[in-house]
């Protein structure tokens, strides 16, 4: 069809692909000049029933990872500025707020990338035994982060992050703990401490470069 001279060829192709993708058991793929095939997403917006959105389905792992890196780069830049310059408390407030925002986005999205990759590794039809119980895919997806990477992923992938990549394993566990502190925010009420002082200090002191490297190593090892 792509070699023919059919009027409105693109429109007709989209109609054919749209119908085909709705058939049971059919997944549409599209090739390119390098002869690679990509799975295509086919979406009809509720507000535009006449419009079909067709595109190469993105892998959220890469989106979260790349987005996390972008935010981490900004975090590091702002931290350098904070540590280099002498800001008054009034001047530092908006700068530190921006730093916190970028650090939050960076940390959470890096861990999201790792967790998304873990969940992708779980087969649809699986019955895995753990602690005397048979776990389905849904059961495994709802296990906590550390249980997945420490005990379940070795059974699924044959890769033991705890034994073979222990430094990276420890780093992403610590990063996940920080992510949880950021998301499930709890205030601290102790003498001479403001509510979130310890959390702010942890964000300032975090070795972002090393943690980004560990996330990258884990993704490559499991990818």
Image (cartoon, rainbow, N blue to C red):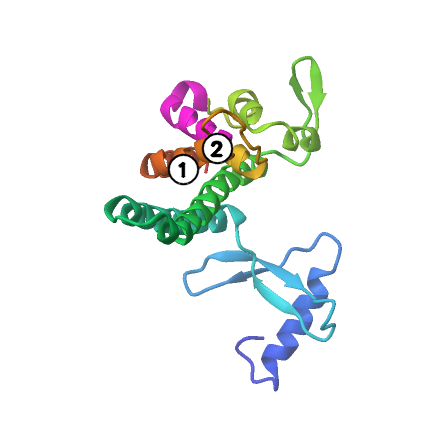
> For the stretch drawn in magenta, what is the main secondary structure?
helix
Q: Name the residue under label 2.
A: 178
Q: Residue 203 carries which label?
A: 1
Q: Foreground: 130 or 20?
A: 130
Of labels 1 and 2, earlier in sequence is 2
Q: Do the residues labelled 1 and 2 touch (CB within 8 Å)?
A: yes
Residue at 71% of width from left, 73% of height from top? 48
User: Regarding mark 1 in the picture, which secondary structure is present there?
Assistant: helix
Q: Residue at x 49, y 48 (%)?
A: 64
> Residue 75 location in percent, x, y?
37, 47
Q: Which image quadrant: the C terminus?
A: top left
For residue 152, above or below residue 10: above
- Toward the top, the furthest residue is 132
Residue 62, numbered label: none
Residue projecting furthest to the bottom:
7
Toward the left, the furthest residue is: 84
- Is residue 170 depicted above or below 1 in this figure? above
Q: How far apart are marks 1 and 2 (CA)?
A: 9 Å
Taking 200 as reference, is 174 above or below it? above
Rendering coords of residue 207 (x, y %):
33, 34
Judge the density around disc 1: few (<14), some (14-19), many (≥20) Cα neighbours within 10 Å: some
Q: Is residue 172 magenta?
A: yes
Give me the residue at 48% from left, 34% from top: 194
Q: In the rendered image, which quarter is residue 44 located in?
A: bottom right
The span shown in magenta is 161-177
């Amino acid at each position: 069809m792509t070699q023919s001279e059919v009027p409105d060829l693109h429109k007709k192709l989209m109609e054919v692909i749209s119908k085909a993708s709705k058939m049971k058991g059919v997944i549409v793929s599209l090739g390119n000049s390098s002869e690679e095939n990509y799975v295509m997403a086919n979406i009809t917006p509720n507000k535009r029933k006449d419009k079909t959105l067709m595109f190469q389905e993105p892998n959220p792992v890469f989106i979260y990872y790349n987005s996390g890196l972008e935010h981490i780069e900004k975090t590091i830049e702002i931290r350098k500025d904070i540590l280099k310059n002498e800001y008054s408390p009034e001047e530092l407030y908006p700068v530190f707020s921006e730093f916190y925002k970028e650090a939050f986005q960076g940390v959470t999205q890096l861990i999201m990338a790792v967790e998304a990759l873990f969940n992708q590794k779980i087969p649809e039809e699986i019955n895995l035994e753990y602690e005397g119980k048979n776990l389905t895919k849904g059961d495994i997806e709802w296990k906590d982060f550390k249980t997945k990477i420490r005990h379940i992923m070795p059974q699924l992938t044959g890769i033991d992050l705890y034994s073979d990549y222990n430094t990276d394993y420890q780093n992403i566990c610590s990063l996940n703990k920080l992510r949880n502190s950021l998301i499930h925010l709890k205030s601290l009420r102790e003498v001479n401490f403001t509510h979130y002082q310890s959390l702010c200090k942890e964000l300032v002191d975090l070795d972002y470069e090393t943690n980004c490297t560990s996330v990258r190593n884990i993704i490559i090892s499991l990818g």
